[in-house]
Image (cartoon, rainbow, N blue to C red):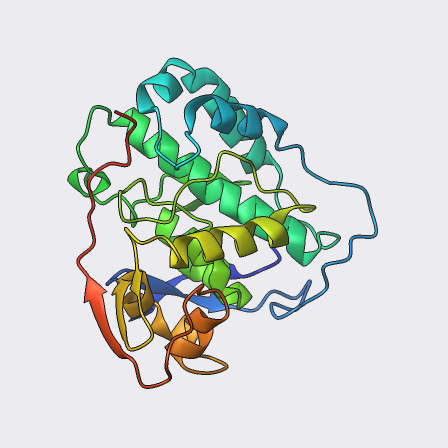
Amino acid sequence: MKYLLVVLLSVSAYSCFSAKGLPIKEVKAPTTTNINSTSNTSTTEALLDHSSWDALLKKYVAKNGDVDYKGFKSDAQKLDEYINYLASKVPEKNWNLNEQLAYFINVYNANTIKLIIDNYPTKSIKDIGNPWMKNRLKIGDEDYSLADIENGILRKMNEPRIHFAINCASYSCPKLLNTAYTADNVQELMERATKEFINNSEKNKLSATQLKLSEIFKWYKSDFTENGSLIDYINQYAETKISADAKIDYIDYDWNLNEQN
């Protein structure tokens, strides 16, 4: 784990809780890079090959984000091979921000699919014991949980659009795109995912004076309001212009599996 760029997760006690109630581990800044780095320019060709994951997504994920878990289960070997490939590619100091973002988003999404198919059939990810906090994945020789990747790494990258890129296998989640994230497309795909989710009338109901929002915006409000209000953030993407004093309510989260019919 010598070169894990974004954060090094320590074994010390949990320091605080995310708004969803999941502990965020104590972290220390690595010595190899700056966690707040904004450089998106790579000095090398693509360092990672996500093509096998892209092929699986195109085969088993519909355009609306619904997932064919039975199909993924039938191709479990290919999924495991990709996850093992990611585990072997410990981030190094020559990785730029886009390479890191794409890597950790794919780590999260691929391991979430694996969690579901390892416990399939299931009606909800929440029916699986300790789905987010249990160490289920590896990066190099280190064990991580899904919460470690989300709260300890991705959220530390100061990029709120990651909330629309990672998928928790549930109906109310932002949809799982059927394209793998790469260093070349991660900015474009995060932007697309954010805009599509905010303007999805099943997930958010927007009008000029009243909002009914996904609970994602309540759980992670601090991530969206670092440079303004929550309405300011949503207005960057909303097709409906929202008043600064619009009333905000939240829609109960539907944790049913986002499975294809």
Q: Residue at x 45, y 35 (%)?
A: 110
- The answer to which of 94 and 249 lies nearer the viewer is 249
Indicate the quadrant containing the C terminus: top left, top right, bottom left or bottom right: top left
103 over 205 or under it: above or below: above
Residue 225 falls in image quadrant: bottom left
For this orientation, the residue located farthest to the top is: 74
Q: Residue at x 38, y 63 (%)?
A: 25
Look at the image and tell me whether residue 142 can be seen: no
Q: How many numbered dots are placed on residues in this image?
A: 0
Residue 143 falls in image quadrant: top left
On the rendered structure, is 143 left or right of 255? right
Q: Position of residue 207 (x, y in %)?
A: 31, 69
On the rendered structure, is 237 left or right of 249? right
Q: Residue at x 80, y 42 (%)?
A: 45
140 over 205 or under it: above or below: above
Q: Position of residue 212 (x, y in %)?
A: 24, 66
193 over 218 or under it: above or below: above
Q: Position of residue 211 (x, y in %)?
A: 27, 70
- The answer to which of 48 and 196 lies nearer the viewer is 196
For this orientation, the residue located farthest to the right is: 43
Q: Position of residue 187 (x, y in %)?
A: 62, 54
- The answer to which of 150 and 224 lies nearer the viewer is 224
